[in-house]
Image: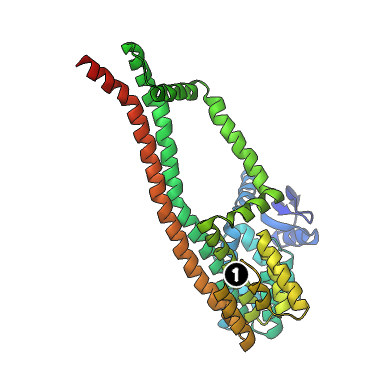
Amino acid sequence: MLFAVTAIDARGERLSESFEAEDLQAAQRELMSRGLMVLSLEPARSPAGVLASIRGARSAARPGAKLREVAVFARLMSMMLRAGASVVPAMSAIREQPGRPAFLALLADLAERVESGVSLHDAMARHDHIFSGAVRTVIAAGEATGSLAESFARLSQLLDARMRIRRTVVGALVYPAMLLMMAVGVTLTMALFVLPRFTDLFKMLNTPTPAVTQIMLDAGTLLREQWVWVVGGPVAAGAALWAWLRSRSGRELVSNLVLHVPVLGRAVSGVLLAGLLNIWAALLRSRVPLLETVREAREAVAHPRFRALVSDVETAITEGRTLSGVLKQSRLVPPTIVATLQTGEESGRLGESMEFVAAWLEEENDALIRSLTRALEPAILIFMGLLVGGVAIGLFLPLFDIATAAG
């Protein structure tokens, strides 16, 4: 029987091919023996089957799907395990739910490996691009202590908190982005449709135009006649800037600069700190030792200054110093948060203190982001009003002068 497969090999490269196998189970065994991570696998009886597998591979790369899928998986696993199911039957039941073929194939691989005697966190390590080190550490702690259901519950809360932060930031930027698009649309409409009519009108009247009006007319003419360069130049510059921002030096420079912007820096710092504390709290509540907790959290921290802070904390704990002592010396952590964490550290309830502080920070961040959004909206509206009003005054002022002179 002919099968079409799209998979990722050990080098991380995507491949698509067709091969012969007796049945679906035999095809899966052959692919596993080759060390491939299957994205899609189905009978290739016709070219349509191959096209379907390609579509499945494309959907597997959808951005933003991994975090949501892992969060749902953790929530369902917590429910199933608390209901008395074991790991493999629980994952088999989850596979019956609707979902992307790529993620369902991943669950099948996890279930098969666990059934063969591999621990769940080791099976997850094979898919480290889906399950981060922090996720695997929480699961490993649950397996070691026999509290896997509670570990999945904490993992679900951790991932939900990260998604909530992402939704807050994205939701806050939607309306200002729409206003900016409207401003660009109004500008292009003026340049492409309104200015040409006034250009012809002023030529017909054969009257001198003010300097401001002439500048706008010349700008409109330039945009219409040289639109390839006028549009292509900013697009090329934007592409180059985007490529630089994706580089390590660009990311580090911009990340550090953002923290120095008065209000925006506070919001970004609060979001990053809340995410870090949530990870630490989830690991500590899963009975992971503090030093290992700090080490595992480094993988989930992308900002260079926060990554440096995590390294400083790790060094301090290795030398026998306290976590709160290091945080007290950092400008990234407010003194009130340091005092709360110090109290939790002294009372042996550091994980609970981190959970409390992270929840409080998330509320503060939500309010601050909404305030920033409310401040941006009138600023953009004022900019649009000044733009449209300036263009209108520049165009109609010569007409008023002509009407006054004629009267």
The residue that mark 1 highlights is 333
Relative to the observer, which residue lies in front, 269 or 277?
Answer: 269
- Residue furthest to the bottom in view is 347
The quarter of the picture where residue 217 lies is top left
Q: Quadrant of the C terminus?
A: top left
Disc 1, SS = loop
Give the residue type at disc 1.
Val
The percent coordinates of residue 49 (x first, y second) are 63, 47
The quarter of the picture where residue 160 lies is bottom right
* Residue shown at 35% from the left, 20% from the top: 198
Left or right of 278? Residue 2 is right
**185, above or below 319, in the image:** above
**208, above or below 67, in the image:** above
The percent coordinates of residue 405 (x first, y second) are 24, 16
Relative to the observer, which residue lies in front, 379 or 131?
Answer: 379
Left or right of 278? Residue 212 is left
* Residue shown at 57% from the left, 82% from the top: 82
The percent coordinates of residue 377 (x first, y second) are 40, 50
- Give the class, few, some or many, for how many residues have Cα within 10 Å of label 1's Cα (few <14, many ≥20): some
Q: Taking the image as drawn, is residue 364 in sight?
A: yes
